[in-house]
Image (cartoon, rainbow, N blue to C red):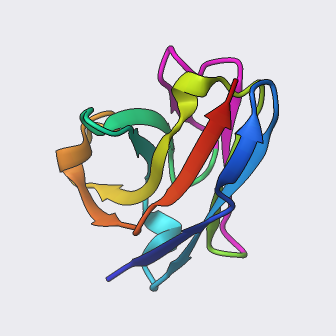
């Protein structure tokens, strides 16, 4: 069992930065691949980034590539999403997810565990 708690969301102007954190509890965190998703009002939840359990392999959505960086600190049971050069279209609730049992990092229905989400609002 894994519990996930996101933090770090907020309001920022376009071009600004935010760093999201996802604190995990549970013995299986160290072996879990992790992902970040986001959902804007009226839209489906979409993949943002993912990282394997060692931290050596990452994957990004094209829309955030070059601007966002996913990382993890297994000693702190925490996954991060550094978001730079934010755009108004990045506005959404951001969710942390763990353990994609089906093996696909980009499909939200593959993930077993989810956090409650944190709001990110980018104004122009």
Q: Is residue 29 above or below residue 33?
A: below
Query: Which quadrant of the structure image shows residue 7?
Result: bottom right
Where is residue 119? Give x, y as percent. Answer: 53, 54
Residue at image coords 61%, 19%: 65
* Point 60% across, 43% down: residue: 121
The answer to whether residue 102 is visible is no
Q: Is residue 15 above or below residue 79?
A: above
Magenta span: 56-75
Q: In terms of image quadrants, where is residue 14?
A: top right
Percent x, y for residue 109? Answer: 17, 47
The x, y position of residue 122, in whole percent, is 65, 35
* Percent position of residue 5, x then y: 51, 74
> What residue is at 75 percent from the left and 46 percent from the top?
18
* Front-lying residue, 123 or 108: 123
Please state which of residues 12 and 31 is positioned toward the viewer in this rendering.
12
- Was residue 51 drawn as part of the magenta stretch in this picture? no
State whether residue 59 appears in this view.
Answer: yes
As drawn, is 91 to the left or to the right of 102? right
Quadrant for the N terminus, please: bottom left
Q: How many marks?
A: 0
When the figure is inspected, residue 95 is found, relative to residue 59, above or below; the finding is below
Q: Which quarter of the rendering shows the C terminus?
A: top right
Residue at the top extreme, as displayed: 62
Rendered residue at 53%/36% (across/down)? 91
Task: Say whether residue 85 is left or right of residue 5.
Answer: right
Q: Is residue 58 magenta?
A: yes
| Up/down of 69 relative to 81, above or below | above
Instruction: Identify which residue, 86 or 24, lies in the foreground.
Output: 86
């Amino acid at each position: 069992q894994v519990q996930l708690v996101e933090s770090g969301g907020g309001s920022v102007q376009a071009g600004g930065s935010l760093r999201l954190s996802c604190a995990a509890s549970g013995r299986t965190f160290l072996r879990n691949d992790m992902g970040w998703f986001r959902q804007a009002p009226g839209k489906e939840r979409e993949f943002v980034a993912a990282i394997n359990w060692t931290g050596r392999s990452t994957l990004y959505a094209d829309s955030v590539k070059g601007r966002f960086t996913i990382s993890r600190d297994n000693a702190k049971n925490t996954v991060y999403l550094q978001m730079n050069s934010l755009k108004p279209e990045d506005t959404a609730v951001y969710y942390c997810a763990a353990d994609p049992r089906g093996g696909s990092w980009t499909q939200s229905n593959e993930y077993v565990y989810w956090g409650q989400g944190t709001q990110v609002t980018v104004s122009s």
